Amino acid sequence: MTAGAGDVARFTYALFAGDLLDETSRREMLTFLPVPDEDVPGQTGYGLGVRRIVIGGDEMVGHTGTFPGYSNVSLYSPKHDHAIAVLSNLSMSEVTRVLAAVHAVLAEEGR
């Protein structure tokens, strides 16, 4: 089974804004420790498998990942109630920069 960026964004939205987890589990997942990551300069905390990252001045939650030949980011914006996923077949691509550009457009449009 494969998933595209739209599938990952829908999952991310359901995980953070939907009914995949009960409120207790979601609260535990989103309890962040102040753990910086030099590879993710905007990271302001780390929860249970979840990064908290500031993108364009807005706090977003989700995850990033790289594997030889691939990189990705999938984040949810609680302020704007949208999820964005960017998947790339380049190990060192600027997926977070692309996500920031998409987020800026959606936030400006009020989404």
Image (cartoon, rainbow, N blue to C red):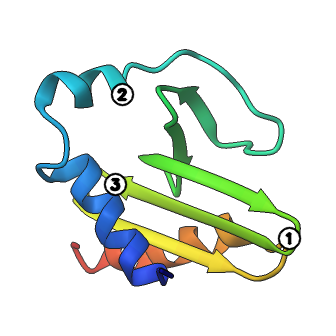
Please state which amino acid type lies under the numbered disc 2: Met
For image coordinates 14% across by 53% down, the residue present is: 18
Query: Does label 3 or label 1 sit earlier along the sequence?
Result: 3
Does 19 appear above or below 83? Answer: above
Q: Position of residue 43 (x, y in %)?
A: 62, 37
Find disc 3 in the rendering and name its residue.
77
Q: Position of residue 61 (x, y in %)?
A: 43, 45
Query: Does label 2 or label 3 sit earlier along the sequence?
Result: 2
Q: Quadrant of residue 86?
A: bottom right
For image coordinates 65% across by 64% down, the residue present is: 96
For image coordinates 53% across by 45% down, the residue present is: 54
Q: Quadrant of residue 41?
A: top right
Find disc 2 in the rendering and name its residue.
29
Q: Is 27 positioned to the left or the right of 39 in the image?
A: left
Find disc 1 in the rendering and name its residue.
91
For image coordinates 18% across by 48% down, the residue present is: 20
Helix, strand or loop at label 2? It is helix
Label 1–label 2 contact, CB within 8 A:
no
Disc 2 or disc 3, which is closer to the eye? Answer: 2
